[in-house]
Image (cartoon, rainbow, N blue to C red):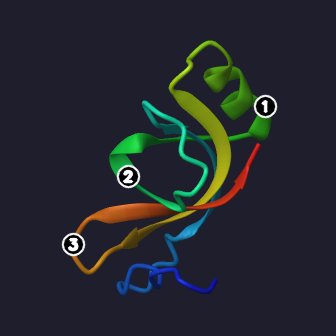
Amino acid sequence: MHGMVPPDPSGEGISQAAYATVYMPKFKNSRNRFPASCITVYATPQEALDAARDDAKRFAAIVQGPSKSSEGQYIFYLRQWL
C-alpha cells in the first residue's frame, strides 16, 4: 500500500490485515498509523465491534501490521474503520 512501511524485514510474513480496536482518547479521522501499544487484535470483526461498543476511546477497525518504523517502533496502519 502506498505510504506504508514494508513488513518486518525478517521475512516471516508477520505484517497482515487484522480486526482490532484502536485506542484514541480523541478520535482523529485523519490519522492512518498507530503505535502497536494502541492496538488490540481480535479474531473476528464482531469481537472488535463488541469490544469497542462500551468504550468511548476505542474504535473498531481493520489494520495492517505490525511494521517496524524507521524510529524502531512497531506500528499498525489503518485500512478501514468498522
Residue most extreme to the top: 54
- Quarter that holds the N terminus: bottom right
- Quarter that holds the C terminus: top right
Q: Which residue is drawn at 53% across and 83% down?
A: 3
Q: Residue at x 52, y 57 (%)?
A: 31
Q: In this view, does 28 lie to the left or right of 43?
A: left
Quarter location, residue 70 = bottom left
Q: Marks 1/3: CA distance?
A: 32 Å
Quarter location, residue 58 = top right
Q: Mark 3 points at which residue?
A: 72
Q: What residue type is labelled 3?
A: Gly
Mark linked to residue 36: 2
Measuring from the top left, give residue 14's x and y in whole percent.
49, 70
Q: What residue type is labelled 2?
A: Ala
Q: Name the residue under label 1.
A: 46
Q: Bin the neighbour count of mark 3 within 10 Å (Cα to Cα): few under 14, some 14-19, many 20 and up.
A: few
Q: Which residue is drawn at 71% across and 21% down?
A: 50
Residue 52 against residue 1 in the figure, above or below: above
Measuring from the top left, give residue 17's x and y in whole percent.
65, 62
Of the pair 50 and 24, the residue shown nearer to us: 24
Q: Which amino acid does label 1 sit on?
A: Gln
Classify mark 1: helix, strand or loop: helix
Q: Is residue 80 left or right of residue 70?
A: right
Of the pair 8 and 81, the residue shown nearer to us: 81
Classify mark 3: helix, strand or loop: loop
Of the pair 39 and 27, the residue shown nearer to us: 27
Measuring from the top left, give residue 61's x and y in whole percent.
67, 46
Residue 54 against residue 7 in the figure, above or below: above
Q: Bin the neighbour count of mark 1 within 10 Å (Cα to Cα): few under 14, some 14-19, many 20 and up.
A: some
